Image: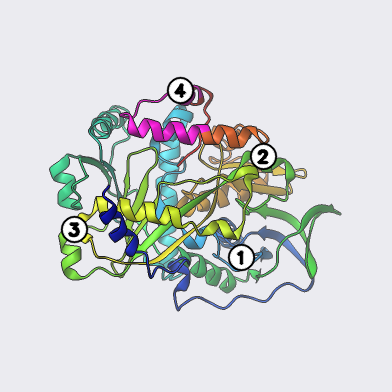
Amino acid sequence: MAPSAMNRWITSLSEAQPVPYWLEDPGKPHAEPALTGTETCDLLVVGGGYSGLWTALNAKERDPQRDVVLLEGREVGWAASGRNGGFCAASLTHGLPNGLARWPDEIHTLEELGARNLDEIEKAVARHSLDCEFERTGEIDVATETYQARELRDWHRQMQDRGLADGVDFLDADEVREQVDSPTFQAGLWDRGGVAMLHPAKLAWGLKRACLQLGVRVYEHTPALDLKPYGAGMAVRTPYGSVRARQVALGTNIFPNLVRRVRSYTVPVYDYALMTEPLTADQLASIGWHNRQGLGDSANQFHYFRLSADNRILWGGYDAVHHYGGRVRSEYDDRPETYAKLAGHFFTCFPQLEGVRFTHAWGGAIDTCSRFSAFFGTAHQGKVAYAAGYTGLGVGATRFGADVMLDLLSGEETERTRLEMVRKKPLPFPPEPFAWTGIALTKWSLARADAHGGRRNLWLRAMDKLGLGFDS
């Protein structure tokens, strides 16, 4: 990479604001007041991201008489739910390959439940008039190396053999570049109906409004400090009061779980993204993208990218940064060295867009677990349920997780609770320094595999056999 080109690309970041583009929307609602005093309810939901919001909404839709309270430590949608890429996927398993590797006997059921879940999200968007820029355009997984193109073709054949390729088309180099024109694209898999694009913060804000309209009492700027049994139910202490509830659903994800034994199952990783200025008609024409699909490349250290409603390009991913000890700090949200790297990758992918400026650059923590997809459980004799570990693919899967938590709290066996995915947990992460060392070695190995034709070294092969990993 020539220094002059790098300098030009870094210049594209000179006016980028270090804040999530989505959260600057002028339609952002006012926060609800903090809880003061004592509340009682049937169901207390902790967490005002997608996981908690879908739980509260679905609980009220199942039983309109159910008394539901939701607590959010800051403001609804401020964390991962408001700053992600806005890819709402049907997959419940962090992609079909991961699901097939872990639950081959259940994969058809998991795929069917995931498709049904995405349909239900689309219906909820219409039913509650959620103005979240929902576009069911699908997603293309693109190959940028010859070996990746070969692997995509082979994978599509495997999908066909297993009856899992419905609505998924293989695109050769010419076909994928007819959809989106990048000189780096060599092939693609287009999942036509299994992914929707949306405005992530507007979805969170719309779900909050829908919850309020159904009678959920929402308290913001109200962190849950601890969880203890209280009589026949549970009690949660907050800075200015407390909530006594018959049942509790925990949707706190990367933030410390109130059930302490759950904490070792997740680690925080920091993900980063850029947003361009709106493209002109000529700029948009130079890359095509008429069908507005989401895109992601096939490397281990991958990028995800998409068009916003006003034709900006969101470009994110690649670096996945884990800090020693699993620390989550606001200063980690801004990482200029990653922004510079992402800018260089962007203009390598789309050289015809050189001169475009980035208006926003941001990052933040997401939770991951050793199987890359959500896990579930109960505590306190079934009075508390939790879901966590979505690993960055929670825009859609959190609604399914909400239903799982409600099923678990009901005590009734359902199609969801019978799943091995729901009944069994991933392996926990080891304590430090072993967690950090293992993650660092895995990241190094993944980067090395990308640079050597996808060949996985002894460490990665061992991790594969153990069902462990660290997703970039």
- Of the two numbered discs 4 and 1 on the same chain, state the one appearing first in sequence: 1
Q: Tell me residue 281's x, y (percent).
A: 18, 70
Q: What stretch is highlighted in magenta?
A: 441-462
**Along the viewing direction, whichever of 411 and 8 lies nearer the viewer:** 8
Q: Tell me residue 38's x, y (percent).
A: 81, 69
Which amino acid, by three-letter code, is at mark 4? Arg
SS for callout 2: helix
Q: Which mark is residue 153?
A: none
Q: Mark 1 points at which residue?
A: 64
Q: Residue 352 carries which label?
A: 3
**Along the viewing direction, whichever of 16 and 1 lies nearer the viewer:** 1
Of tags 3 and 4, the one toward the viewer is 3
SS for callout 1: loop
Residue at point 19% right, 46% down?
176
> Is the residue 111 above or below the residue 155 in the image?
below
Image quadrant where residue 137 sits: bottom left
Residue at point 16% right, 60% down?
286
SS for callout 3: helix
**Total marks drawn?**
4
